[in-house]
Amino acid sequence: MTSSACYAPSPPINASDVDGMLQDSSQLHLEFQPQVNLWTGAIDSVEALARWRHPTIGNISPALFIPAVHRLRRQRELFERVVALAVCAARTLLDANVSVPIAINACADTLADPHSLAFLLEETSRQAVELSRLRVELTEESPVLDLPALNAALTELRRSGCEVALDDFGAGHANLSMLAGLTVDEVKLDRGLVWRMADSRVARESVRFVLSLGEQMGWRVVAEGVSSGAVLQMLRALGCRHGQGFLLGRPMPLQALMAQLGSRLASPFHPCRTIPTPALPALGCARPKVSPLRG
């Protein structure tokens, strides 16, 4: 996901730049993007997104610095910095009596490393935050090189109450083959697939298939990239119940998120509630069942 921040043109990112980001607490911070119930407008969870403000260059896009971190093999260090910040944010929400899980991104190599899981467990214990207050999103940047180690880590996370999601399904390495080898609680549809629904039957049928598979497997299916009312209408017509995107909420600082959580409780107006549901029979879809929702 990208934020509303303006990113300066950036020269090539080198190892000393990444060192500074990881070691200087003033450079790296988090923004939080809501994941929303498409039928009620309620915020189900938020995704923690790493943001880098370089002391001389300014804001550097994640599309530039995340690949640099991977190229320099500093993924685990970035993961640990994000975990520390996310757990601190979860503690703040907990102290404010706000029960909204925070999702943290990690690639397969990072999660398969036992040091990463140990750090997460230690940090949540240190700050007295239950693991159920977090979710871990497995990203698509790298292939699964050690499936047994990755599954062991995911099993331990889920056993401890932390849900696991497969991020950006339909892009990179996040495909059916990867999904078939993992045990997850949530599948997030890649925004490129969601955006193409309007003019691609393949994209529409792919989304429909994953929604059906998710219902059969007990997964929460989340559509990323919900950026217009037209996309929201199509997703609701297909029975999608969860989404994330600029229409539903842009990435924001923690204090802004807490203010938005309070305002949504007080106000009846929200895009999910004000955009009418299209006539479903014309699309050959059944209206989704009304049943208790997970998460």
Image (cartoon, grey):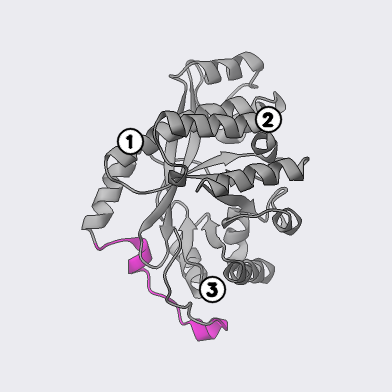
- The tag earlier along the polypeptide, 3 or 2, is 2
| Secondary element at tag 1 | helix
Label 3: how many Cα within 10 Å (few below 14, some 14–19, many 20+): many
| Structural distance between the alpha carbons of marks 3 and 2 | 36 Å
- The tag earlier along the polypeptide, 1 or 3, is 1
- Residue 52 percent across, percent down from the top left: 50, 27
Chain part drawn in magenta: 268-285
Quadrant of the image occupied by residue 128:
top left
Q: Is residue 199 visible?
A: no
Residue lying farthest top? 16
| Secondary element at tag 3 | loop
Residue at left 63%, top 59%? 193
Q: Is residue 205 above or below residue 3?
A: below
Q: Residue 127 in magenta? A: no
Label 2: how many Cα within 10 Å (few below 14, some 14–19, many 20+): some
Q: Circle 3 is placed at which residue position? A: 238
Q: Quick one: quadrant of the C terminus?
A: bottom left
Q: Residue 284 in magenta? A: yes
Please tell me how many numbered marks the rendered image carries.
3
- Residue 151 percent across, percent down from the top left: 69, 46
Q: Amino acid at mark 2?
A: His
Q: Which mark is residue 70?
A: 2
Label 1: how many Cα within 10 Å (few below 14, some 14–19, many 20+): some
Q: Which mark is residue 92?
A: 1
| Structural distance between the alpha carbons of marks 1 and 2 | 30 Å
Left-right relation of 8 to 208: left
* Residue nearer the viewer, 281 or 45: 45
Residue at left 68%, top 33%? 113
